[in-house]
Amino acid sequence: MILGIDIGGANTKITELEGECYRIHHIYFPMWKKHDKLVELLRRFNREEVEKVGIVMTAELVDAYRSKREGVKHILEAVERAFPHRDIYVFDVDGNFLEVEDARRNYIKVSASNWTATAYFVARYISRRCILLDMGSTTTDIIPIIDGKVVAEKTDLKRLMSNQLLYVGALRTPLPFLTNVITFRGCKTNVSSEYFSITADMNLILNKIGREDYTCDTPDGAPVDRESCMRRVARILCSDLEELSEEEILDVCYQLYGKLLELVRYNVDLLSKRYNMKDVVITGLGEGIVREALEGYNILSIGEMYGREVSLSTPSFAVAKLLEDLGK
């Protein structure tokens, strides 16, 4: 068995791969609060039949660590402790598998590497020329692939500077990030920038996600039912459900959702013009959202090709498949 493990800041995703059979696990695991429990989590998957372990990560960026170097070091130590006597390989941003000691020395190459596994998987199995668009709970990766080569920048900073990383997602983005002004009761109205509500609230109200998809913490600690989501959205106007009607909250959500689509479209359009490409491969929890944003593009869906479970956990599935290929 090969394990593909994607250790993210908010979610850890694990693919167990045996030939054509696989099983995927999604675990909400906020590393900023639980990083000291990572070994305990990973040990649950150290079964006798495990032969190789492939790792990608983004959790080194959480504020539990003072630096990426410190984060990578801690994560790799946790993996080693969880999987003693196993062959461990860490996928880097150049598309190579590194042994743990090499990954530790070249920490910047394995930092924020999960998108790379997805991109190399897409280039090998799906399309040699496309823009890969992966919207997860927190971020959206926008990765150009040309002639089978991943031509994206190698660090999060440079990807942010190049329209290849958009820090909006289907769940965890605070709604005021989308805009600070909406139209409300005919007036241009300022929006509170407090951490009252997130995109998961908006997307659940608008039926863009189901309750089972709302896997992150809610801003107020309340449940994820529709009424609680509406209450949280009302708070961005410093209001409650006694002041705002359901129709008004829906209108607010539609306006904010439109802003989300505009952000995605704007960044993809820039890359499309830059590289003269209209083919897009979509994956992630936000597949349906990005599909709405990209009318007129030629879209291939990993969810439709491989199933929703793979779409929700593409980096872990991808790193497992790529590690399997390495042994062939």
Image (spheres, rainbow, N blue to C red):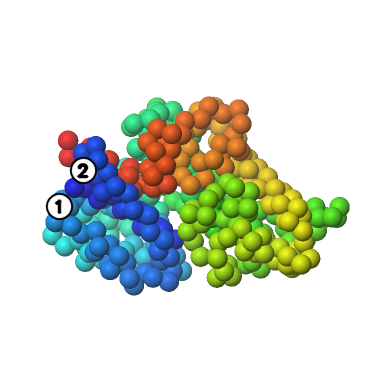
Residue at 62% x, 67% y: name it: 195
Q: CA distance from mark 1 to mark 2?
A: 10 Å
- Where residue 168 appears, as percent x and y from the top left, is 56, 52
* Number of residues whose C-alpha sits closer than 10 Å to that of mark 2, classed few (under 14), some (14–19) or many (20 or more): some
Compared to 230, does 144 lie above or below?
above
Q: Is residue 42 visible?
A: yes
Label 1, on which residue? 49
* Residue occupying the point 18% across, 57% down: 47
Q: Which of 23 and 293 lies nearest the eye of the viewer?
A: 23
Q: Relative to 257, is 19 on the left or the right?
A: left
Q: Amino acid at mark 1?
A: Glu
Q: Is residue 294 left or right of residue 303?
A: right
Q: On the image, which quarter does residue 26 sit in?
A: bottom left
Q: Badges 1 and 2: C-beta atoms under 8 Å apart?
A: yes
Q: Percent position (x, y) of residue 234?
A: 71, 63
Q: Quadrant of residue 291?
A: top right
**Which residue is denoted by mark 2 in the rendering?**
18
Is label 2 in a helix, a strand or a loop? Answer: strand
Q: Is residue 121 above or below residue 108?
A: above
Q: Residue at x 80, y 52 (%)?
A: 183
